Image: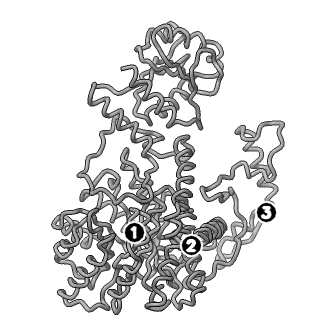
Amino acid sequence: MVAHSTASGLPLAAEFPEPAREQWQQQVDKVLRRSGLVPEGEQAPDPVEDVLATETYDGITIHPLYTASPADPGAPGLAPFVRGSRPQGCVHDGWEVRQQHAHPDAAETNREVLADLYNGVGSLWLELGPTGLPVGSLADALEGVHLDMISVVLDAGPDSAEAAAALLELAREQGVAPGALRGNLGADPVGLRARTGETVELDSALEAVRLSAGSGLKAITVDGLPFHDAGGSDAEELGCSIAAGVTYLRELADEVGVDAATRALEFRYAATADQFLTIAKFRAARRLWERVAREVGAADRAQAQHAVTSSAMLTRRDPWVNMLRGTIAAFAAGMGGAQAVTVRPFDAAIGLPDAFSRRVARNTQSLLLEESHLAQVIDPAGGSYYVETLTDELARAAWAWFQRIEAEGGLPAALRSGLVADRLAETWERRRGAIAHRTDPITGVSEFPNLDEPALRRDPAPAPRSGGLPRHRYAEGFEQLRDASDERLAATGERPGVFLATLGPLADHNARASFARNLFAAGGLETPDAGPTESTADVLAAYDGAPVVCLCSSNKIYAERAAETARALKEAGARHVLLAGTSEIEGVDGRVFSGCDALEVLQDLHRRLGESR
């Protein structure tokens, strides 16, 4: 028995022998064999836990256990800034809660802005121009807003100079000294080229730096979102953003000096529901930029970061789940050290957010900061073997991609040549394939959809700028099928459907019937079923004449009755018979199973069901 001292506390770990890694691996081997992942009689891989490893879209292997960090990440607030740009982290004042506004009506925007500022928001991100508020309405939208008490970030695309001038004029009218202004004038000709294909001269960035001189404003947004929204990986978004930053340094350094050029930049990155990759991305981004800034001799080498919850991960179906996605993404961005965070409203993929969704978005951050106290710990992820290793590997992958872009002549040249577009398209195809096979599941869309939930309606948002890199949402393929199902329902009073021919009692068919029901619902297909049956005659008695049928049961009953039932159903009018599972059965036209290309199956069924009308 170990004696304990009340002064020293309970040394609980001292009561147990320290296990060796080999002991843990033996237990892993037992579990994998019981689950069938390592068949009995076969040699397990070495190390055995590699069976559980996965790979990111950047080729980084995610292991189930980490026992060491690759390198010392340094201290918070010190180079290479992996652990944060400030020694105190966000302890004193939290991160900046930054809300986006893109409503084209100035009066409505003003109401939304004031509601945000009265309820916890400290920073406004205003989208201006054709995709948002008219630049000439900026003063009306900011009526009653004290510019010396908040930060304002502009996003005006080709109208950035006009928008910057309007903001500075408004500050002069309010009597606000330039040094009291905070935020970003938001010039980003490189990002605009990526998003829209429009060529805007880089000297617009220089003009923004000159306009911001003597103020507390940054001048340029280095926007990584176009590369993320095109389906790119985390390392690809990082590499492109660092290349964009270097482009601006080349343009500005000779005119305003390296220090002024680096201070003018703020980097914007997507935060996703992949918590650990998001944490690692923001840490890796600071490390990468510190290396660039050190090479050019900048005095201030810390990267200013703005995190935005991903628009690509938002869904139009079951949009309530977006609240959870946004919460996880905001948590990860804050833990990763972002200085400003924007949570997109849960209905942003549908149209213009309403007051309720905007309230939920800002309260998400208030809860994380005020109730969960996340900002009260400096770099809470620091020291995690997994996070430190992932940060290092992600930084290396991003640096390699950055070097490839530089070898092309820099980011503008890589955009013109198609290097960036081709690379992102390859990644999107791999991602689209994983989504289609449901190995990257989307809750409420590809998994656990609710066909009875009415679609949420919102006023349409202004069309986003287009013409450059494509914009994807991960759920778009499945949601197109749901839209087609809704149109069929509106036109005919019923949805397209697949009849589930359930063979045997509930205990035998329930698991595969539930799987099939979930898969078909992801495409908007109804699934009436036969219920418990004892014979082919029972199935035929329940059959509703649907042109597509799916057999559902155990392998044992498949062997006894599936071929006979498939033949009988075809004689009764079924044109296409599927089977839930991997069994090879005579008369079956296709199979659905875990890991199949669900999107391809559903698209094929929509074609067949459309032809049968």
Q: Earlier in the sequence, mark 3 or mark 1?
A: 3
Residue in view at x 58 percent, y 76 percent: 288
| Amino acid type assigned to the residue bearing label 2 in the image | Gly
Residue in view at x 50 percent, y 30 percent: 514
| Amino acid type assigned to the residue bearing label 1 in the image | Thr
Crowding near the residue tagged with mark 2, few <14, some 14–19, many ≥20 C-alpha atoms within 10 Å: few
The CA span between labels 2 and 3 is: 58 Å
- Viewer-nearest of discs 3 and 1: 1
- Tell me the quarter of the picture where residue 117 sits: bottom left
- Residue 345 location (% of width, % of height): 33, 58
The residue under label 1 is: 199
The answer to whether residue 317 is left or right of residue 408 is left
For label 3, the SS is: loop
The residue under label 3 is: 17
For label 1, the SS is: loop
- Residue 111 location (% of width, % of height): 19, 67
Reply above or below: 206 against 584.
Answer: below
The CA span between labels 3 and 1 is: 65 Å
For label 2, the SS is: loop
- Residue 520 location (% of width, % of height): 46, 31
Q: Nearer the viewer, residue 552 or 600?
A: 600
Quadrant of image for the N terminus: bottom right
